[in-house]
Image (cartoon, grey):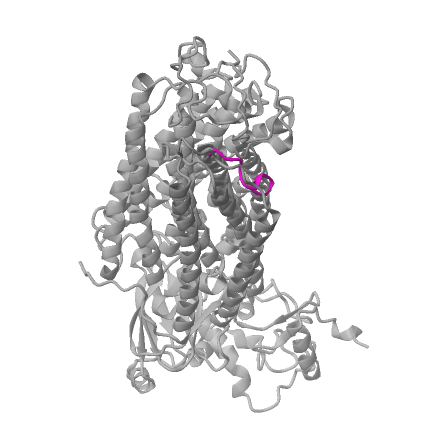
């Protein structure tokens, strides 16, 4: 039995210190009120213990006191709420310049893919000093990506991508736990995050046997599955042009507008008829059960890079497949403000 | 019994509900709420010890980091059945169906509950559900966890998930019936003079509980029926392979199961209000604040379910709304704690066993509640969600709170129920052992959780062992604290001192009738002329028999 036990897990990410500070504050509040109540009770049971020579004094009711002990806890909990919400916002939203890594959970292991095509199982190598965004999906049930030393946790769902991010601060090996119960070997679905200095990380990347970058593997799949037959950049194509698509708003046949993000692309491959782009027929077959989660990630990565690889202007932007270039900034702004963008045709 | 004001030796009434009738039929076909309460008491005690046995095996396995005592599948079944047993077959019915069933009509001055037959039916449904589930457990069990999360439960496990869902759905009907009965009884069966402002706080809290039982439980039934249908016929509701959404299940499950937490704690709070006033010989400090805080908790309880889902992939902004609303539940709970404490101020406090439990409750519930605020705080929850921190938190509320209140209430009303006193010395000892054992078991789990030990782990990294051994050691102490009362309560049935009508010199209609009460509770319909908890006023001792 190991007899040393700390009260805090190791602090190994930029967020860890902030979470611990919040935790300490909360422990302080909890201790203060628990002690206040305990000491008051202790004092009362000694001072006002039952004695034959004195009776209870019937003091009761004080609206002032009731207001005081309603308002003070209200103030404190509101303060806690705000602090917690601000911290949560930081934990939930990865910085834009983050290194992107993909992870797939399945009963009972983790698979990771680096953008350069390096793959790992139950181990994830990351550089220190740089934000890392892990895009996660499950192949079966709900799992959970939990790294105590980084103070991050995210349920990994089987039907859509979720993200988690961290910036490791010191090299070392840290526990990766699945913390959402996932069946028989739930407690064996553990792994390690290995944080390395950026130089060591580069060296590690170079030593890895990669068949090619994720995007190039995606391109291979794209051709293998015959996607290019319809998704062509010419105006006669039966499917929407995918170049420069990633991250842009797309108008659907029911006039809704969605952003073409990872989840949209994944859904469009697995359930092509769920969100059909305006001006196209729902003729695409489903690829559910055909493409693996790993493959989906690679194809998405390829589509992501399609726009950037193309140096010439994309020829059919003005066809109904996608929104016109001049519409995009306005719609993006509207989406940011949370409003439903009006269909472009009815714009004054 | 510390203030022995009456020199007359208490006597057992000649005729009461226990000796009114004999034979198995007189119990199994009874419509007397007091006998049904005893039927419930015996059955939930059985299931409490069953759940306890599962817990003991869990703690035994966790003594070592390797999963060496059971296979992973067996371990997963153990914690699932511990949870299902304790939540659905002990905690939810515990106080309402036993103490509430027994005392609530008497407190109101009523002869019985509004629907005595439905009350009996509710017990039969409970028994059917409980033994159905027990049979499911014996014949293979389930390994879903008590939360039944999809798509694991609906599409991946090979155990008796659908059967267990049926058991739990039936248990739900039993609590709907109890809730319905209480609501109608409180509205329609109050004795002359028993205005809403004079209702004992135990009645208020059971009333609030009943509202939740009636309004929330149907959602659990719907959710589990959908789960069973998806499992059996592959309709796509929760499983993405059939076009469902797994997070939808969590919304529906917690829409019941979070309010259910208040089903489990509110009646306990009601018991504490009775105990603190009685053993301080004082009126409760702020009657209406304590009464309405119960209703407030019941109402807010419906609006906070998604705080179980902060890392489940819900929108950040909805997480913020649910965090804010969860903070709101803390306020009425704090109001209660402050009012109980203030009630003791300048009282005349005696530390009989029920009071020891009540004081233990206030301490443990305060910690349970405050750690609940920590979990409702978004940035904090991300790290401790689904770890032992959560386990520790809800055991502080459910065991430190509810079980402690239940035991306190059982000691308090035991003389009323049986006509005999329990032995004071071992009872005090048991109360103290429970308190120590409880803290030793669950406090280390807060630390374990913050260190990052996830829930439902059969095996764990070796650095967590010391705290786990501490916790298991505490559990063995806690077990003694729970077994002791079972022994001396049974002993007292035959050898306990005759209690007399009002051994605690308490106010409340239940103390104005005999111990045990006659079958129809009162020989004459009582008339209420004073406010509740009228301690200190010259007590008119109305002798009714």
* Residue that appears at 39% across and 17% down: B7
Q: Is residue A153 visible?
A: no
Image quarter (top left, top right, bottom left or bottom right) of the N terminus of chain B: top left
Q: Residue furthest left?
A: A1
- Which residue range is magenta in the image? B281-290
Q: Compared to A24, does A345 lie above or below? A: below
Name the outermost residue toward the bottom.
A312
Residue B72 pos. (x, y %): 28, 49
Image point 52% across, 71% down: which residue? A262
Residue B200, relative to residue B398: is it above or below? above
Residue farthest toward the front in the current orientation of the protein = A53
A119 vs A306, left or right, is left
**Magenta residues: mostly which secondary structure?**
loop
Decide whether residue B286 is among the magenta residues: yes
Which x, y percent locates residue B9? 38, 14
Return the residue nearer the eye: B32 or B535. Answer: B535
The answer to whether residue B355 is left or right of residue B534 is: left
Residue B383 sits in quarter: bottom left
- In the image shown, does B241 or B350 lie closer to the viewer? B350
Which sits in the foreground, B231 or A316?
B231
User: Percent x, y for residue B131?
Assistant: 39, 29
In percent of the image, x 68 and y 70: which residue is there?
A278
- Left or right, B496 with reference to A96: left
Assess whether residue B276 is covered by the magenta stretch: no
């Amino acid at each position: 039995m190991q007899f040393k036990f700390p009260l805090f897990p190791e602090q190994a990410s930029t967020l860890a210190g902030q979470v611990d500070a919040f935790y300490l504050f909360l422990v302080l509040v909890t201790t203060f009120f628990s002690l206040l109540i305990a000491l008051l009770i202790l004092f009362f049971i000694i001072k006002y213990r039952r004695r034959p020579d004195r009776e209870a004094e019937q003091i009761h009711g004080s609206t002032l006191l009731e207001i005081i002990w309603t308002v003070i806890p209200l103030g404190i909990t509101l303060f806690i709420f705000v602090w917690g919400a601000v911290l949560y916002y930081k934990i939930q939203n990865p910085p834009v310049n983050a290194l992107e890594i993909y992870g797939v959970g399945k009963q009972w292991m983790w698979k990771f893919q680096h953008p350069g095509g390096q793959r790992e199982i139950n181990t994830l190598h990351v550089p220190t000093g740089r934000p890392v965004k892990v895009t996660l999906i499950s192949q079966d049930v709900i799992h959970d990506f939990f790294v105590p030393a980084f103070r991050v946790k995210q349920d990994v769902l089987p039907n859509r991508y979720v993200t988690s991010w961290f910036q490791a601060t010191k090299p070392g090996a840290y526990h990766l736990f699945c913390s959402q119960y996932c069946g028989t070997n739930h407690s064996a679905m553990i792994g390690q995050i290995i944080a390395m200095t950026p130089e060591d990380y580069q060296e590690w990347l170079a030593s890895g046997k990669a068949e090619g970058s994720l995007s190039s593997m995606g391109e291979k799949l794209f051709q293998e599955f015959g996607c290019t037959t319809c998704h062509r950049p010419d105006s006669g194509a039966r499917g929407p042009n995918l170049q420069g698509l990633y991250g842009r708003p797309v108008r659907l046949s029911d006039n809704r507008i969605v952003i073409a993000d990872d989840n949209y692309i994944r859904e469009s491959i697995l359930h092509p008829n769920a969100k059909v782009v305006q001006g196209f027929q729902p003729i695409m077959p489903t690829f559910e059960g055909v493409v693996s989660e790993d493959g989906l990630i690679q194809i998405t990565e390829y589509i992501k890079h399609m726009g950037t690889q193309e140096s010439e202007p994309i020829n059919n932007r003005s066809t109904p497949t996608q929104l016109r270039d001049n519409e995009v900034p306005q719609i993006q702004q509207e989406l940011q403000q949370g409003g439903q963008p009006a269909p472009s045709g009815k714009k004054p | 019994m510390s203030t022995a004001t009456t020199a007359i030796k208490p006597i057992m009434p000649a005729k009461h509900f226990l000796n009114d009738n004999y034979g198995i039929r007189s119990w199994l076909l009874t419509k007397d709420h007091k006998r049904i309460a005893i039927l419930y008491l015996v059955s939930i005690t059985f299931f409490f010890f069953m759940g306890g046995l599962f817990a003991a095996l869990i703690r035994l396995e966790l003594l070592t980091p390797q999963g060496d005592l059971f296979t992973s599948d067996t371990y997963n079944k153990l914690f699932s059945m511990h949870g299902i047993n304790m939540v659905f077959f002990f905690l939810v019915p515990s106080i309402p169906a036993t103490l509430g069933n027994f005392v609530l009509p008497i407190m109101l001055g009523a002869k019985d509950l509004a629907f005595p037959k439905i009350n009996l039916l509710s017990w039969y449904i409970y028994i059917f559900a409980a033994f159905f589930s027990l049979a499911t457990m014996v014949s293979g069990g389930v390994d879903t966890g008590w939360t039944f999360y999809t798509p694991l439960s609906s599409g991946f496990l090979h155990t008796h998930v659908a059967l267990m869902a049926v058991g739990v759905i039936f248990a739900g009907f039993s609590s709907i019936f109890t809730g319905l009965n209480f609501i109608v009884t409180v509205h329609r069966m109050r004795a002359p003079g028993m205005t809403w402002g004079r209702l004992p706080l135990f009645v208020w809290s059971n009333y609030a509980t009943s509202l939740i039982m009636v309004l929330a439980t149907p959602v659990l039934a719907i959710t589990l029926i959908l789960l069973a249908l998806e499992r059996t016929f592959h309709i796509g509701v929760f499983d993405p392979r059939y076009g469902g959404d797994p997070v939808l299940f969590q919304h529906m499950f917690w829409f019941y199961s979070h309010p259910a937490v208040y089903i489990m704690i509110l009646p306990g709070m009601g018991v504490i209000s009775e105990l603190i006033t009685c053993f301080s010989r004082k009126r409760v400090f702020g009657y209406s604040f304590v009464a309405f805080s119960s209703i407030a908790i019941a109402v807010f309880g419906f609006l906070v379910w998604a705080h179980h889902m902060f890392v489940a992939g819900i929108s950040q902004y909805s997480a913020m709304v649910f965090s804010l609303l969860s903070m709101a539940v803390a306020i009425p709970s704090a109001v209660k704690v402050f009012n109980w404490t203030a009630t003791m101020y300048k009282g005349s406090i005696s530390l009989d066993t029920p009071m020891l439990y009540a004081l233990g409750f206030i301490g443990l519930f305060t910690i349970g509640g405050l750690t609940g605020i920590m979990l409702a705080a978004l940035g904090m929850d991300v790290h401790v969600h689904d770890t032992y921190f959560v386990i520790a938190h809800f055991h502080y509320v459910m065991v430190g709170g509810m079980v402690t209140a239940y035991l306190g209430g059982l000691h308090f009303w035991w003389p009323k129920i049986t006509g005999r006193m329990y032995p004071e010395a071992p009872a005090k000892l048991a109360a103290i052992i429970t308190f120590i054992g409880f803290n030793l078991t669950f406090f280390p789990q807060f630390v374990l959780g913050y260190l990052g030990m996830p829930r439902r782990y059969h095996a764990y990294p070796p650095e967590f062992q010391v705290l786990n051994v501490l916790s298991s050691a505490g559990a063995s102490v806690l077990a003694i604290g729970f077994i002791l009362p079972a022994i001396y309560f049974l002993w007292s049935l035959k050898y306990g001192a005759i209690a007399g009508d009002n051994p605690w010199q308490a106010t409340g209609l239940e103390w104005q009738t005999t111990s045990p009460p006659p079958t129809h509770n009162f020989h004459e319909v009582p008339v209420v002329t004073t406010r509740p908890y009228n301690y200190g006023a010259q007590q008119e001792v109305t002798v009714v028999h």
